[in-house]
C-alpha cells in the first residue's frame, strides 16, 4: 500500500515539474541579422555604446502578441552563455518605427515564460552561478518602461 502511494506521488510530482518546465521557452538565436530592422536594432545598440565588438546573437519574437517582433540581442563574452557566465541581454522593440531599448539584463541565460503581465510575456532570468535551475522572474514594468525583477 505504501509503495503504491509513493509511486503515485512520484508520478504526480514528475508530471507537475514537467509542466512547470514546459511553461518556458528559450529564444532561438541566430548568428547574423536577417533584415533591415534587425540591422537597425544592432546599430542603435552600437550608437548608444552598448554593443561592443564582441560576438552577439539575435532572436526575433513577439513578446506582447501584437504581431510585431521584439528582439533579444545576446552579447556573448564567451562563445556560449551558461548560468555561470555574465552575458548581456538587450531587449529592443520599435516605437514609431524606430528602435528603442526595452531592457538590459546581465545573466547567464534568459527564457520566455508563457505567463504574462500587462499583456507582455514574463522572463525567466538565470543568474545563479551555483544552479542552472534557479531563476528570477522579470516582468514589464510600465512605470519604469523596462523589464524589472518581481
Image (cartoon, rainbow, N blue to C red):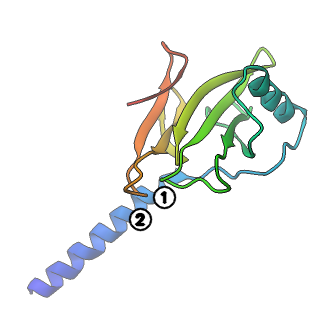
Please indicate, yes or no, whether residue 65 appears anywhere in the rendered image: no
Closest to the observer: 147 or 114?
A: 147
Please indicate, yes or no, whether residue 115 appears anywhere in the rendered image: yes
Where residue 32 appears, x then y in whole percent? Answer: 84, 47
Where residue 60 appears, x then y in whole percent? Answer: 73, 41
Q: Quadrant of residue 137 in the image?
A: top left
Where residue 93 appears, x then y in whole percent? Answer: 70, 27
- Report, in whole angstroms, how far the alpha carbon at label 2 lies from the one at label 1: 6 Å
Query: Which residue reaches farthest left?
Result: 1
Label 1 crowd bin: few (<14), some (14–19), many (20+), radius 10 Å:
few
User: 72 left or right of 10?
Assistant: right
User: 143 left or right of 128?
Assistant: right
The answer to the question of whether label 2 and label 1 lie on touching residues, with beta carbons closer than 8 A, is: yes
Viewport quadrant of the C terminus? top left
Residue at 78 percent of width and 14 percent of height: 96
Closest to the observer: 30 or 94?
A: 30
Viewport quadrant of the N terminus? bottom left
Could you tell me which secondary element the residue under label 2 belongs to?
A: helix
Could you tell me which secondary element the residue under label 1 belongs to?
A: helix
Q: Which mark is residue 22?
A: 1
Residue at 36 percent of width and 63 percent of height: 17
Q: How many marks?
A: 2
Q: Which mark is residue 46?
A: none
Q: Which residue is mark 2?
A: 18
Amino acid at each position: 500500500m505504501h509503495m503504491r502511494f509513493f509511486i503515485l506521488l512520484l508520478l504526480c510530482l514528475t508530471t507537475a515539474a514537467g509542466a512547470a518546465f514546459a511553461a518556458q521557452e528559450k529564444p532561438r538565436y541566430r548568428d547574423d541579422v536577417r533584415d533591415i530592422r534587425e540591422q537597425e536594432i544592432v546599430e542603435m545598440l552600437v550608437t548608444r555604446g552598448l554593443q561592443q565588438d564582441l560576438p552577439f546573437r539575435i532572436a526575433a519574437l513577439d513578446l506582447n502578441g501584437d504581431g510585431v517582433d521584439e528582439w533579444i540581442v545576446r552579447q556573448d563574452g564567451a562563445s556560449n552563455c551558461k548560468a555561470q557566465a555574465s552575458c548581456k541581454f538587450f531587449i529592443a522593440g520599435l516605437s514609431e518605427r524606430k528602435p528603442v531599448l526595452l531592457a538590459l539584463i546581465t545573466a547567464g541565460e534568459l527564457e520566455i515564460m508563457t505567463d504574462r503581465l500587462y499583456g507582455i510575456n514574463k522572463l525567466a532570468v538565470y543568474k545563479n552561478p551555483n544552479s542552472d535551475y534557479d531563476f528570477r522572474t522579470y516582468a514589464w514594468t510600465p512605470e519604469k518602461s523596462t523589464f524589472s525583477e518581481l
